[in-house]
Image (tube, helix red, strand yellow):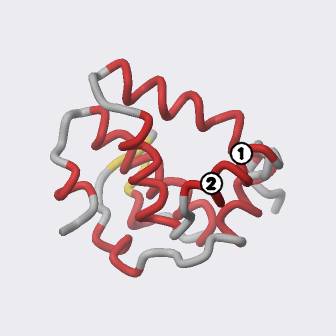
Amino acid sequence: MAKHRIYTTSFASVYPLYVAKAEKKGRTKAEVDQVISWLTGYGQEELNTQLEKQTDFETFFAEAPMINPSRALIKGVVCGVQVEDVKEPTLREIRYLDKLVDELARGRAIDKILRK
């Protein structure tokens, strides 16, 4: 079975869409970065490096310094799919990120988004 095309998509090409979605709803780029950092363990410099390198999603998650173990608490639907039901690990990580950005854009409190 062929890999989904999102694996080879540059994270840097989707990142501005995440930021735009959040900003459209009154949130900030810093909050998007905070959510990404919480999920992946990337610091701001490391995140900027990944964006500059045009890293694809598969590599972005494979090189993540520390995937947050609390991500399993993320539940819900993204693009009509229950994130917790996604079997392929990398695609599940991508869906987790999508869900976190959705929650941010919907105005959910940052502490709840970060599962505190």
Which residue occupies the foreground of this view, 47 or 18? Answer: 47
Q: Which element is circle 1 on?
A: helix
Q: Quadrant of the N terminus?
A: bottom right
Taking the view exactly as shown, the residue that stands out farthest to the top is 24
Look at mark 2 in the image and give the residue it sits on: 47
Residue 47 in percent (x, y) is at 62, 54
The image quadrant of residue 52 is: top right
Q: Residues within 10 Å of mark 1 (few under 14, many from 20)?
A: some
Residue 87 in percent (x, y) is at 54, 71
Which residue occupies the foreground of this view, 83 or 34? Answer: 34
Taking the view exactly as shown, the residue that stands out farthest to the front is 45
Look at mark 1 in the image and give the residue it sits on: 51
Asked if marks 2 and 1 touch (Cβ < 8 Å), the reply is yes
The image quadrant of residue 59 is: bottom right
Q: Which element is circle 2 on?
A: helix
Q: Residues within 10 Å of mark 2 (few under 14, many from 20)?
A: some
Which residue occupies the foreground of this view, 26 or 101? Answer: 26
Callout 2, which amino acid? Leu
Left or right of 115, for residue 97: right
